[in-house]
């Protein structure tokens, strides 16, 4: 996995709402290798706000709530996803096997891409679609 650099700031940070955010955080860390950066629980055990890091990237996670922003998980949208993060992974074969072992629902098995690198797509337990790949679009020599 990529190591996080304190000198690099991610300027795009996806956010997701989960029905069971505490369990989602545990699963995302176990299955995909995210690390807890900050977790702010509510008094009722739901998650007000959480930040999970992966390399130099970050996602924000929180519990579903009824507010003016109308954030909904895929399960409330007929299984449709409104965002599909792509996460660059150094050892894609190892990452794929880790996700399989944790019970990720594989949508696209690990495949070679025409533009370089390997990719797989999977869903987490609440239906969010994730793409993981070894192709790094920032690497001009790739």
Image (cartoon, rainbow, N blue to C red):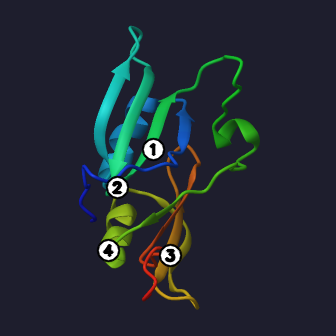
Q: Residue at x 34, y 68 (%)?
A: 95
Q: Earlier in the sequence, mark 3 or mark 4?
A: 4
Figure check: 21 above or below 56: above
Pick the front one: 99 or 132 = 132
Figure check: 126 above or below 55: above
User: Could you give the CA–CA distance between mark 1 and mark 4, rounded to whole angstroms?
Assistant: 19 Å
**Residue identified by numbered label 1:** 59
Q: Residue at x 57, y 25 (%)?
A: 64
Q: Are marks 4 and 2 in contact (CB under 8 Å)?
A: no
Q: Residue at x 45, y 31 (%)?
A: 21
Give me the disc on residue 56: 2
How many neighbours does mark 3 have within 10 angstroms: few (below 14), some (14-19), or many (20 or more)?
few
User: Could you give the CA–CA distance between mark 3 and mark 4, rounded to whole angstroms?
Assistant: 13 Å
Pick the front one: 118 or 107 = 118
Q: Provide residue 88's location: percent of width, then percent of height.
A: 42, 68
Query: Is 36 on the left or on the right of 79, as rendered?
Result: left
How many neighbours does mark 1 have within 10 angstroms: few (below 14), some (14-19), or many (20 or more)?
some
**Residue identified by numbered label 4:** 90
**Helix, strand or loop at disc 2?**
loop
**Residue identified by numbered label 3:** 137
Q: Residue at x 48, y 48 (%)?
A: 11
How many neighbours does mark 2 have within 10 angstroms: few (below 14), some (14-19), or many (20 or more)?
some
**Helix, strand or loop at disc 4?**
loop
Give me the disc on residue 31: none
């Amino acid at each position: 996995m990529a190591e996080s650099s304190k000198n690099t700031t991610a300027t795009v940070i996806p956010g997701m709402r989960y029905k069971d955010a505490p369990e989602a955080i545990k699963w995302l860390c176990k299955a995909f290798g995210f690390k807890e950066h900050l977790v702010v629980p509510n008094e009722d055990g739901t998650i007000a706000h959480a930040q999970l890091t992966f390399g130099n990237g970050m996602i924000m996670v929180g519990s579903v709530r009824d507010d003016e922003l109308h954030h909904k998980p895929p399960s409330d949208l007929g299984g449709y996803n409104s965002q599909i993060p792509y996460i660059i992974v150094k050892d894609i074969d190892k990452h794929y096997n880790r996700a399989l072992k944790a019970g990720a629902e594989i949508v696209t098995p690990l495949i070679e891409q025409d533009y370089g690198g390997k990719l797989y797509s999977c869903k987490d337990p609440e239906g969010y679609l994730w793409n993981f790949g070894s192709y790094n679009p920032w690497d001009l020599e790739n």
